[in-house]
Amino acid sequence: MSNPKTAIVIGSIVAAFLPREIPPMTPWLLALMGLATDFFWYSTVVLLFSRPKAQRGYLRFKAWIDRVAGGVLAALGLKLMVTP
């Protein structure tokens, strides 16, 4: 809750794919879906990374994971910048 990076990333992804005009209930549904997704995602990550084998595998591929994630976020940012 104290780290706004997740909300910023999710917000940028959602903003990149939403049309200009949305129904009035859409923000509420997106907020509920985001809450449920975050809860289940972080629960899964905690369970997965509590195992030493998963920790070692992540550390082995961390640089590539960071590069791919950065490329995806850069592409979404460019899409937002060039879409009128």
Image (cartoon, rainbow, N blue to C red):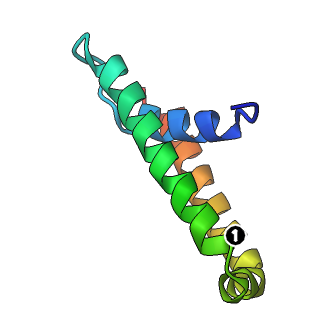
**16 is higher (above) or lower (below) than 25:** below
Q: Position of residue 35 (x, y in %)?
A: 46, 35
Q: Nearer the viewer, residue 76 or 23?
A: 23
**82 is higher (above) or lower (below) than 29:** below
State left or right for residue 69 relative to residue 83: right
Q: Position of residue 71 (x, y in %)?
A: 62, 61
The amino acid type of the residue labelled 1 equals Arg
Q: Please tell me which residue is depicted at 50% across the width and 45% down the height of the picture.
A: 39
Inspect this view and state whether residue 44 appears: yes
Q: Identify the image quadrant of residue 61.
A: bottom right
Q: Identify the image quadrant of residue 68.
A: bottom right
**Residue that numbered label 1 is attached to:** 67
Q: Please tell me which residue is depicted at 77% across the width and 81% down the height of the picture.
A: 59
Q: Nearer the viewer, residue 12 or 82?
A: 12
State left or right for residue 42 relative to residue 83: right
- Within-10-Å neighbours for mark 1: few <14, some 14–19, many 20+: few
Q: Position of residue 64 (x, y in %)?
A: 69, 78
Q: Residue furthest left?
A: 23
Inspect this view and state whether residue 16 appears: no
Question: Which type of secondary structure does the marked residue at label 1 adopt?
Answer: helix
Q: Please tell me which residue is depicted at 75% across the width and 36% down the height of the picture.
A: 3
Image quadrant occupied by the N terminus: top right
Q: Identify the image quadrant of residue 16.
A: top left
Image quadrant occupied by the C terminus: top left
Q: Nearer the viewer, residue 56 or 13?
A: 56
**35 is higher (above) or lower (below) than 68:** above
Total count of labels: 1
Q: Nearer the viewer, residue 61 or 79?
A: 61
Q: Position of residue 24 (x, y in %)?
A: 25, 10
Q: Please tell me which residue is depicted at 62% across the width and 34% down the height of the picture.
A: 8
